[in-house]
Image: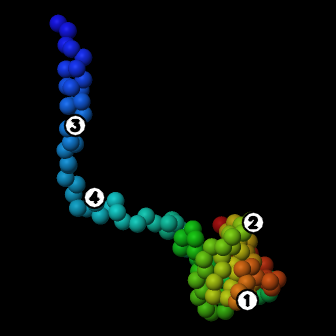
Amino acid sequence: MRIPVAIALAIGVAGCNTAPTKTETPAADTAQSTAPKAEAPAAAAAPVRYSCADGTTVEARYPTTDTAQIVVAGKTVDLKIATSASGARYVGGGWQWWTKGMTDGMLAPIKPGEETASAAGTTCTAPAA
C-alpha cells in the first residue's frame, strides 16, 4: 500500500508541531544555575608576601583574574587589571603593581592622569612556592 506524498508530509509536519513538555526544576537547581561563578580559585586569594629592593614589603592577594589587593606601608589598596605587554599589571590608589609569575613584581607610584607609572619603582620578589 502506498501513502500519497501529501499525506506523508502532513503527518511528518504535524509531528513537528507538538510543543515540548515542561519539566519541573527544583528551586535549588535553579538557584544553583543562576548563581555567579567564582572568578578565581580560593587559593588565588591567599596572600603572597614580596620583599622589595628598597626594603618595602608588599603583601598581595589576587581575588579575581581582574583584580589585586596589596598591602603596602600598612595600607590596603584595591587594584584593577591594566594593559601590559608582558606579565600582569594592576593600577589603583596611586600605585602600579606589575608581576611576572607569582615570584617577581615591580611596585611604583603612579601619578594622577598617568596610565603607566613614570617612576622607576622598586623590584620585589617572593619565595618560590
Question: Going 46% across and 66% down the picture, which residue do you hit?
Answer: 38
Is 44 displayed left or right of 8 in the figure?
right
Q: Which residue is mark 1?
A: 111
Is 97 displayed left or right of 45 in the figure?
right
Examine the rendering and report whether any part of residue 51 can be seen.
Answer: no
> How is the protein colored in the picture?
rainbow
Query: Which disc, if any, is residue 29?
Result: 4
Along the polypeptide, which appears first: circle 2 or circle 4?
Answer: 4
Given the current orientation, which residue lies at the most extreme bottom position? 74
Q: Specify the quadrant of the image occupied by residue 103.
A: bottom right
**CB under 8 Å between discs 4 and 1:** no
Along the polypeptide, which appears first: circle 4 or circle 1?
Answer: 4
Is 54 displayed left or right of 128 in the figure?
right
Question: Going 72% across and 69% down the picture, which residue do you hit?
Answer: 84
Element type at mark 3 = loop
What amino acid type is highlighted by mark number 4? Asp
What amino acid type is highlighted by mark number 2? Ala
Query: Residue 57 location, x and y as percent?
Result: 70, 85
Q: Which residue is mark 2?
A: 85
Q: Which residue is mark 3?
A: 17
Query: What's the distance in space between the residues labelled 3 and 1, CA to CA?
Result: 65 Å
What amino acid type is highlighted by mark number 1? Lys
Along the polypeptide, which appears first: circle 3 or circle 2?
Answer: 3
Along the polypeptide, which appears first: circle 3 or circle 4?
Answer: 3
